[in-house]
Amino acid sequence: MSVNYLAVIVSAVIYFMLGGLWYSKLLFANPWMKAIGKTEAEIKASGSPAPGYIIAFVGALFTAFILATFINYAGGATLVDGAKIGFYAWLGFGITTLAPAYYFEMRPKALLLIYAGYTLVAFIIMGGILGAWR
């Protein structure tokens, strides 16, 4: 089994950057803040975002590596193969672990949709890249 580490790094960077876009004012910043019950001022006053960014990027690296491993084991060798495997990984591990937690914690459905939508799009894009760039 071989993993293209450059593809993993590129996929992780894209995942991380997609998060920046997803949670920006262009897309879901306002609904996200409303769903978590915070204002922009409260978020800015909570301290440096650097530790969160570091955690997010390291998590993106691990996610990209594991997804690349799944794609290799499944024999994916094209953009479409990778995107499908990314979707199945999200379906089997992403949404199925998020949804029960949100239900039992009585969190807003909008928040689940924002988080699940981000991971869905990210897994499909990363899977496509990793499948095509083996």
Image (cartoon, rainbow, N blue to C red):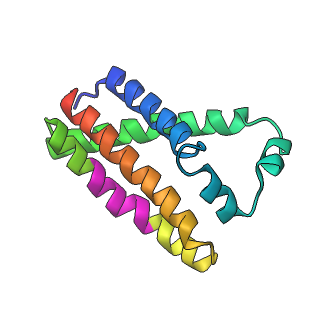
In the rendered view, would you say 75 is above or below 8?
below
Residue shown at 43% from the left, 42% from the top: 63
Majority SS type along the magenta span: helix
Task: Report the side of 98 relative to 120 (left or right).
Answer: right
Q: Is residue 87 magenta?
A: yes
Quadrant housing the C terminus: top left
Camera-side residue of 38 and 77? 38
Camera-side residue of 76 and 36? 36
Q: Residue furthest top?
A: 6
Residue shown at 79% from the left, 35% from the top: 48
**x and y percentages locating residue 89 in the rendered image:** 32, 54
Q: What stretch is highlighted in magenta?
A: 86-96
Residue 127 picture quarter: top left
Residue shown at 39% from the left, 25% from the top: 10
**x and y percentages locating residue 8 in the rendered image:** 37, 29
Residue 12 picture quarter: top left
**x and y percentages locating residue 105 in the rendered image:** 64, 75
Task: Report the side of 46 relative to 36 (left or right).
Answer: right
